[in-house]
Image (cartoon, rainbow, N blue to C red):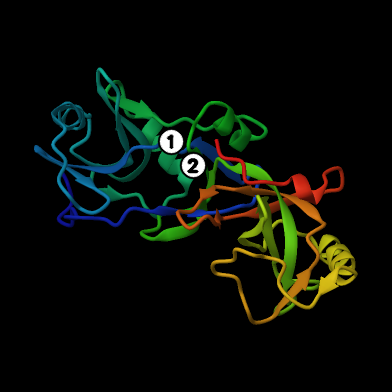
Amino acid sequence: MTGPSFPEWVEPMAATLTQERFTGSEWIFERKIDGIRLLAFKNGAEIRLLSRNRLPQNLPTIAEAVAGLPAHDAILDGEVIWDAFAVAYHVFDIMRLDGKDVTSMPLDARRALLDGLPLGPPFERVPALDDPTPWERACREGWEGVVAKRRDSRYEHRRSPHWLKMKCELSRMLVVGGFTDPRGARVGLGALLVGYFERDDFVFAGKVGTGFDAKLLLDLRGRLDHLGIAASPFTRALGLPRLGAHWVRPEIVVEVAFIEWTVHGKLRHPRLLGVRNDTAAGVVVREVR
């Protein structure tokens, strides 16, 4: 029998975007499914399918499959996607099973509970990936990205640092036109101010503040100090910082990874990949694909 406290709603756990790339035995990686978040509630004969915004979803084949699970009550978490022929519910977590709230169990234990359920079509079980660099596989195969999850993490009803999403990235060469001062314990510089050439303009593309180690920060600061100029070299510069900014001759080329270009022509979530000493600054333009 189900317990008396079967919930009307539970806030789904959300992943935090990261620009870091890592592996480790304490993490599992899953494909990031590009669909609609769906929570499936089974309480006896009552079935409810709700989106992350708590909106009811009319998905008869999934509702029928949830009703057929060999459990009196359950709450599943996943993503639903459609193709030309069918709908599929990609399940990656469970919050309740047969009267027991399992959100305090570690992820590995919750995954074991899912493995014990007969999740045939239209269910699709989201598997753990065993690739050494799963984020690279994601980009090769056209996925949105991957999600890294701590094996020992409980199910938290919030955006959590124990689930980290790594989205597929673009990369471009850009030219440094300035930098900002470091803050706190950071050394060298705070962020690079980068841009590209477009005809006679040097266009500001945004700030790059991640992807550095201490040695690179200090090395770059030393190089940039020798290129200092009094005024900004950017001739088109929407959103250029004014306080704590230092300007340099646009000669140093860097390679930057980022998610996408914003509607305002700025880099979204950029991170430094490295300094390119093999490329002349004057040939760096914005490439659109």
Badge 2 marks a residue whose secondary structure is helix
Q: Which residue is mark 2?
A: 108
Image side of residue 263 versus residue 273, left or right: left
Whether residue 188 is visible, yes or no, is: yes
Badge 1 marks a residue whose secondary structure is helix
Q: Residue at x 67, y 65 (%)?
A: 234
Disc 1 residue type? Ala
Question: Are the residues flagged by discs 1 and 2 in contact, CB closer than 8 Å?
Answer: yes
Image side of residue 197 versus residue 64, left or right: right
Image side of residue 116 versus residue 128, left or right: left
Image side of residue 112 versus residue 94, left or right: right
Q: Residue at x 75, y 75 (%)?
A: 246
Q: Is residue 103 or residue 167 the one in the foreground? A: 167
| Residue 16 pos. (x, y %) | 49, 55
Binning the other alpha carbons within 10 Å of mark 1 as few (below 14), some (14 to 19) or many (20 upward) gives few
Q: Is residue 187 or residue 204 the one in the foreground? A: 204
| Residue 289 pos. (x, y %) | 55, 35
- Number of residue marks: 2
Residue 171 picture quarter:
top right
Q: Residue at x 41, y 36 (%)?
A: 33
Q: Which residue is mark 1?
A: 112
Above-or-below relation of 258 to 242: above
